[in-house]
Each structure stands twice: as C-alpha cells, then as structure tokens.
Image (cartoon, coloured by chain):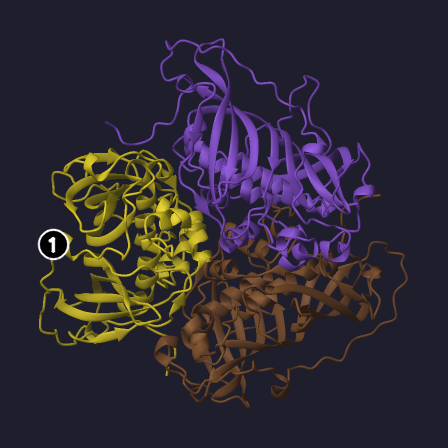
Chain colours: A purple, B yellow, C brown
C-alpha cells in the first residue's frame, strides 16, 4: 500500500465530517521576525511589545495573519491538495490572541457539498477552526474550494450549499480582553488618522509596490507548512512557473496598507475574499483599500472598520472589474475584512 | 604576516591531532523558525512543543539536523576549506538533545590520513564531536574529505585508514531519556503508519518536489556558519554557478520524506552518506527512501528503522546507479541513517 | 485629504526640530537568527551567549548593526523617502547594549540645512538617537542626505552647516559596563591576532566574496522596516533594477571582515561613511580593511581600533579612488569605524 498522502478527492467528503488536521505547530519570536522580513509589516501593535501593552494587551500577540496562515496551512493536505480553485472565504473571526509559545492545530467540518455539472469535480465547503494548546479556538472561518473527483463514476452526493453570512455582523466580532485605545500613541503608530477620520466609501491608494521573488514566497509558504505542490515545484506547470500562495498576497497587501491605514491595527473579521488572478515571481504587488462600513464597539476607544483590500500587479487603483463584470487581469486579490482602530 | 585564514592543507594534519573549531553558536526559536521556512519540515516532534512533551521530552528539542549542520559548519574552516571532495560519513550518533538556548561548539580528531597516488592531495578522516555549553557531547560523526596539498613536495604521512563500522549497531544508538511513544498521536503526526507497517526492502517515493533558489541555500548555509566559498561566490567557478551545500540537500530530502515517513521522527544515527552529484539553483529536488533494516529498542513503544534516503533532481525513483556501478547523474544524495518510530 | 505619507521635502525641515519616528520595534532571538542567515556573521561575542558572558556581558547583546539598522530604518519615512542621496555619517556612538526583548524607537533632531545652488534640493543634517523601552539612548549618529524640494519656489532656509567631528575621540567611546577581555578565548573566537598585533596603516584583504540576491536584500531591508521604494519596487527605475540598501552592504562587509579581523568584536563608533556606488543583485561583494588608528581604553584587556572598511564588487583590494580623486566604480562602501579588541 502506498504510504504517501494522495490528498482527498471530492467523493471522499461527507457533510458533517470533522477532519483533524495534522502537524501542530509552536510559534515564537522566530516566526514574528520572519514575518517582518517577508512582508513590509509595520502595524505598531505587532511590531512593539510596549505598544501592545499600552493598548491593554499584557501578553503581546503575534500578527493576526500569522495565526491565519498557520491554521490555513494545516488544512491544505486534507482540503486543497487536489483543489482546482480556492473559491471563497466567509464568516472568519479571530477569537483569541496567539502569543509566542502557543501551539496551534486545525480542524475542519465539512458543511457543504455540490458536485459540478461536468461530473468531474465539485465544491466543498468547510468551516475551519484553529485551536491552541488549551483546546481553545483562536480563529474560525469558512472556505470553499473546487476539488477533483478521483473516480468520475462516483455518485454525486446530495447537494448542500451552506447559508453563509455575507458579512460578519459587527456585534459578533470578538475583541480581545483588555483592549483599550484611549491612550493610543498616534505618533508611534505612524499616522494621525482616527476611525472617525475615515468615511464609508473612502478609498486609499497605498502607493508602495513590492516586486516578489521565488525564494520569498516559498519561504513564507513553507513557514506555514502549506504543502501544495504548485507553490514549490517548477516542473509542475508547463510554463515552469510557481504559483504564489494566495496568502502571501494577502499578507503583502495588508502590510502595504500600513501607508494610509496604519491605525487599522487588528484584523478581527474576514467577510469574503477572492484570489482574482494568479501571482507569479517578478510581479510588483500594489494595494488599495475602500472603506465599506464602520461600527462602534464596546471596548474603550475602539472602533471597527470594514475594509475592502485589493492587491494588484499594475493598472490603476480603485478599478476592480471590467464591463463584463469580471475581475481585471491585473487584480490579484479582493478581500473584505474587519479591523479595529482607535476612534 | 597575512591575518586571514588560508585553511588547512593536507600536510598540516597529523593523526591524533585534536582541532578545536572556532565560533560557538547559541541556537534558539529563531533557528527553528528559519529551519521551517527553508525546508518543508513537518515532523511533529520538532514542529510542536506539545507533541514533544507528549512523547516524554520535557524540553522540546530542535531538529536533529539543526544540530548536525551547526556542528558541521564549524568544522569547515579547518577541515574542508581546501577540500576537493566530501567523500563520506560514518559512525554518526546523536547523543543529547539540543534545545533553545544551547550553545554549540565543535572539535575534531584526525583519525586517518592517506596521500593520493598523484601526490597532489590526500584523504583526511576526522571524528567530529559537537559539544554544548556544559561540555557534553550532543553529536559525533566521522567524515572524510579529499584535501589539497599546499606544498607538493611535502613528504607523505604514514598511511592510516581507520577501521569504520559500515553501520551503527542498533544497540549503540542513544535514545533520549524519557522518550516514550506509547501515547503517540498518529492523527496529529500526519500518518497512521507504524514501525511494524514497514518491511525491510520496502521503498517509498516521497512524491513532492522543491525547486531550489540561490537565496535559500545561501541563507541556510550561512545560518550554520559554513564558510566554504563555493556556496556563496558566483565568481568562484568558470560557469558562474554556486554549488549548493550538501547539507541543504540532506535537509530538503529529509523534510520531503515526511510524505510517507511522517512517523520516522528522530534521526539518531548516520551510517553513511554520499553527495553523488552537485546541486545547483533551479534543480527540483525529489526524494525516495528504502527500508534497510529495523530493530527494537528498550524505550517504550520506540522502534529503530534504518533508511536509505535518496535525493534526486529528476529521473525515476528507486534507481540509484547505472550499469557502470556509478551514481546516475540525477542522483544528488545517498544517505543511510537510523530513525526512531512508534512501534 | 490623502492619508498616505508622501515623505518630507527639503522645505519641511527646520533647524532644531525634533522628529519622533514611528513604529517601535521589539527585537529578539528571531532577529539574531535572521542576521546570521543574511550575513556570514561569525564574531563570537554575538554568536555565542557563553562567549559574551565570558567577556563580562551578563545579558548577551544583539549584533551592534542590528541596533544600527533598526534605528536607521525608522528614520527613513521622515528623512530619506524623498532623498536623492545619502551623503554621509559622523559622530556615531553605540551607547547601551540591545538585548533580546528590547523595544527600540528613534528620534532625530535637525541640526543643519543647506539649499543647493540649483534650488531644486538641499542637504539636511540630522542627529538620530535610538531609544529603548526605558527611554535610554542605545545609539546616536549624525547623517546627512540630499532631499528634493516639493515646491521649487519655496524660500531657501538660512544655511547652517553643523560642525562635525572628523573622528569620534577614543575617550568618548562608550564601553559596556563589565566588558573584560582578560579571559578572552582566542581559539573559540577564531583567530589569534590581538590588538597589539595590528599596526596603524596595516591592510587586510578579507578574501571571501558573496554574490547578493534580490530576496536576501529585500528580506534584510524589510526586517529593519526600511520603507524606501527603491529597494523593493522593480518598476521604480527605468532599468528595472532594485537598489540594494546601503546598510546591507555595511553588514555584508563587516561580516566578511571576520576573516582577518575576527577579534574586532564590538562596533562602538562610526566616524564616517560613504556609499560610493550602488549595489545591485548579482554583484559579488568583497571587503578589505585598513587600520587607521589605535587607542587603549580603561576596560580590562580592551583596546580600541579604528578601521576603514571598504566593500567592493570586484577590482583589486586596497585601491579606493582614481586619479581624479573619485571613488573607483567598483567601490561600494568606505566606512570609518571604531571597534573593540582584546589587547
């Protein structure tokens, strides 16, 4: 019997199944340093332990996207090794801070299945939770992927398309215990703009660009123990290109968004996301944001802001789709998330 | 007088000489994070502090190959700076865990010398030991290298070829105090295959491939403070290529072997090893393994497995040498080691 | 109002102004590991906690250049985002060790201004201080840069050219409390050469070369949160090249200088520095040093040595300028610094 993991195929999933993903991972200051080396990350709460403490967080957390990538990476061998496409995200919430020394593992529940009309593949919806060493959930999100069938003759499962919220309701966002922005230091944070200074509909061009390299995206993707072949093996595609992990683009764009959104400190909700076009080495990634919504919170001085974060590899900012309603070819990412800001 | 180190030449070595290598190194969570960024390392014992504790290791250790590379790197300025070829390894044993905060240094004893018939070079055998800050040996191994003569007229030393074991006897393998695999979590480890599921002679194709980049192998090689020019200086060879440190290929292949040997957790013995052909940037490294032997141990639930680990840059798996008895040109590495698995 | 930072222009500066730079940064073992991966750094005091303790430093410090780059990086958004050229350094002193867990921030005082005769730009002199979480200065230095004007019609400020010391006087160098080289271990340090073995005027060719890669310099530059576009964005220049951060060349040259100056352990003074020519990916960086001066100190067994450190991308060592008095095109860096050595 072959001992290697062929990954799961569409007909292997059942609605209600809970998959415990392998290889827990302890994260530390090493992961934090690498995150700062791989992305131009400058949000002060994750750069400075002192800044985090001044915001009421007695144990300074690691970047929210370190948690996301670590939890996501574990799901790849079971969810997306045979995926044709990563179709979407919904109902993502950060639930507990991840701090140096924490050990993360992931589990996913299959919440939806729909075979494609071509009979060759289907869509799998999973709700993934990241758990720490105390079995507390630190993060949860839904994603859905299109997965190949192994056996084209396998019967189609009963279709179940989950009913997913278009947006995480602001009252469902989890704010870390103790978070308090009333003594927030805008000088150290890098920009004076408060939550109240942003208007719904406002757009920000983040100006800077970063040309990406093979060594960088492979190091990042390995750091999260994401094993998908397409990111590492240049012989995998006819054109010899390695596809850059979509999460690398998310982190690059989020880091670039510092310039104009330096005070959108914490990512607390993931409403939706599309990896609109593939990213390859040599692409210069840029980003722009749009304010989609705002909400007050119960935490002192803390406002929630809903942002569209778009990564591109060229073209004009603030243009997302063509007349045909499809993403323009230079758009890499269209992400819809909630962040917390000083009010 | 020139103050730079020209390295040692063949006529500088004497049998019985003990060389204390320079620049001790403190390793920490930073080295661990980098190891995970540079290689697709997923063995759970080194990824998760919790998993290690569940296996009876109260202080979670760093990857065994971090110890190997760190100890090896220190020997380069004295042993292989003027080496023509790295010829072999033998009698390697991991003796004590290396944990974050440990400081490692190396020393080597010259145990054999044999001038080549051409009179221009010779073979030097050394037994190297890695020592921690308490002067306890953490690792020892023999390697032999072909080294240039500085002065071709220097007299040949008396030939002494050490008598080396072809294999570390299983009873000589050192198992860390407390190691216990009776509560081993196969789900978290990533594969269900136990020691008893592997048959002697069984072969495993590890399936995945990683295309290597200059920036990655140089970062890895520097991390171990290996100073050999050929790895860093593109002007050093006529073809402008940098030769990738053989240890980079060892770690890449060992990490790839997770897929099919996820439970071969700890490397405890190094029986033999050949860097069959050079590796260069752009090569896509793949790996396959063969079970050479198995042995029970005294530790609860712990079996020893002797594995051949072969790294290639293409070609078919399970083919090692041509009709001429020489390694095929696509074979990069042929390593023979002992690992510990749950029984 | 645009919320992104356009950087400062020449007419925005006033003599006497103090600029508090944004984004404090906590440094740890992760930064140390990355420093060793990015540069062939082997100075024992920063490689081994044990070696540092043996030299009287109870809390082992991070490399002095980690402190420099971290402090420098924070100044970029306010000082050099619109800089045409980085013109010089002076009066640099390391004042306190930076240890894992420290949080650094930077502030700069404008100490000189001089508009260029073309009216399009001017020179800005700043004295920058790095401060730790206890508001203690860990480092200070003067640098001057040529900065564009936003509004060419803006009136020229009153010219003030600061009176800067050509060299930090040896008696002004700060030696860390407890530093004691009387039990210095030359074997572990890697070379036998003492302070007394170096003669003023002596030159050392550091022999080794490192060919630099895009991924490496970008990771380094991001690690210090240096945001200058020219280092990251290949679309920024007509030739598609990314300019390598001058500090990357400083660290590369300093690390290469181990070979011949392994005992020049601590960098304590920065007298002057010129980034003579730009460095690009594919360049092979080499280094040579010249002893400019020596001085005894009050610390036991500790001597100060003033060194010229030159980085090149080819050419002969020990040749700096052409007949025209200009730096040769292959010279990348001409740095004048004080280091501490065992006597």
Q: Is residue B308 visible?
A: yes
Q: Is residue C277 visible?
A: no
Given residues C269 and C311, the one toward you in this image is C269
**Image quarter (top left, top right, bottom left or bottom right) of the N terminus of chain B:** bottom left
* Rendered location of residue B266, percent (x, y): 28, 49
* Quadrant of the image occupied by residue B313: top left
* Rendered location of residue B142, percent (x, y): 20, 62
What residue would you read off at disc 1?
B166
Residue A248 shown left or right of residue C53 in the figure: right
Question: Which residue is located at x 39 percent, y 67 percent?
Answer: B25
Given residues B310 and A280, the one toward you in this image is B310
Given residues C277 and B221, the one toward you in this image is B221
* Rendered location of residue C230, percent (x, y): 64, 52
* Quadrant of the image occupied by residue A198: top right
Given residues B61 and C103, the one toward you in this image is B61
Crowdedness near tag 1: few (<14), some (14–19) or many (≥20) residues, C-alpha within 10 Å: few
Question: Which residue is located at x 64 percent, y 82 percent?
Answer: C167
Chain assignment, label 1: B
User: At numbered mark 1, what does the secondary structure look like: helix, strand or loop?
Assistant: loop
Residue B203 shown left or right of residue A193 in the figure: left
Question: Which residue is located at x 64 percent, y 85 percent?
Answer: C172
Relative vertical location of residue B118 with respect to residue C187 in this rendering, above or below: above
Relative vertical location of residue A14 with respect to residue C11 in this rendering, above or below: above
């Amino acid at each position: 019997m072959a001992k290697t993991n062929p990954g799961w195929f569409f007909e292997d999933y059942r609605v209600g199944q809970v998959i415990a993903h392998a290889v827990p991972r302890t994260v530390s200051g090493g992961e934090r340093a690498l995150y700062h080396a791989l992305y131009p990350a400058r949000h002060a709460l994750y750069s400075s332990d002192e800044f985090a403490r001044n915001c009421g967080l007695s144990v300074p957390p690691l970047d929210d996207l370190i948690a996301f990538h670590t939890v996501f990476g574990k799901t790849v061998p079971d969810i997306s090794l045979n995926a044709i496409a990563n179709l979407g995200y919904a109902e993502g919430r950060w639930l507990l801070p991840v701090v140096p020394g924490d050990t993360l593992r992931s589990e996913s529940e299959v919440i939806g299945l729909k075979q494609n009309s071509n009979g060759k593949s289907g869509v799998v919806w999973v709700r993934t939770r990241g758990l720490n060493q105390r079995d507390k959930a630190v993060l949860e999100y839904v994603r859905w992927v299109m997965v190949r069938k192994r056996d084209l003759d396998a019967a189609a499962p009963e279709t179940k398309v989950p009913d997913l919220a278009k947006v995480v309701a602001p009252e469902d966002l989890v704010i870390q215990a103790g978070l308090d922005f009333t003594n927030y230091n805008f000088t150290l944070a890098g920009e004076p703009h408060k939550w109240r200074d942003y208007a719904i509909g406002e757009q920000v061009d983040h100006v800077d660009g970063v040309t990406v390299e093979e060594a960088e995206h492979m190091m990042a993707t390995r750091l999260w123990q994401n094993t998908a072949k397409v990111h590492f093996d240049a012989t995998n595609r006819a054109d010899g290109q390695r596809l850059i992990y979509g999460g690398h683009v998310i982190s690059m764009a989020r880091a670039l968004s510092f310039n104009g959104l330096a005070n959108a400190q914490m990512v607390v909700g993931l409403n939706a996301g599309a990896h609109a076009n593939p990213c390859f080495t040599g692409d210069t990634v840029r980003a722009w944001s749009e304010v989609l919504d705002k909400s007050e919170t119960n935490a002192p001085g803390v406002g929630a802001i809903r942002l569209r974060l778009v990564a591109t590899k060229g073209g004009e900012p603030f243009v997302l789709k063509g007349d045909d309603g499809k993403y323009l070819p230079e758009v890499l990412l269209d992400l819809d998330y909630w962040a917390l800001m000083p009010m």
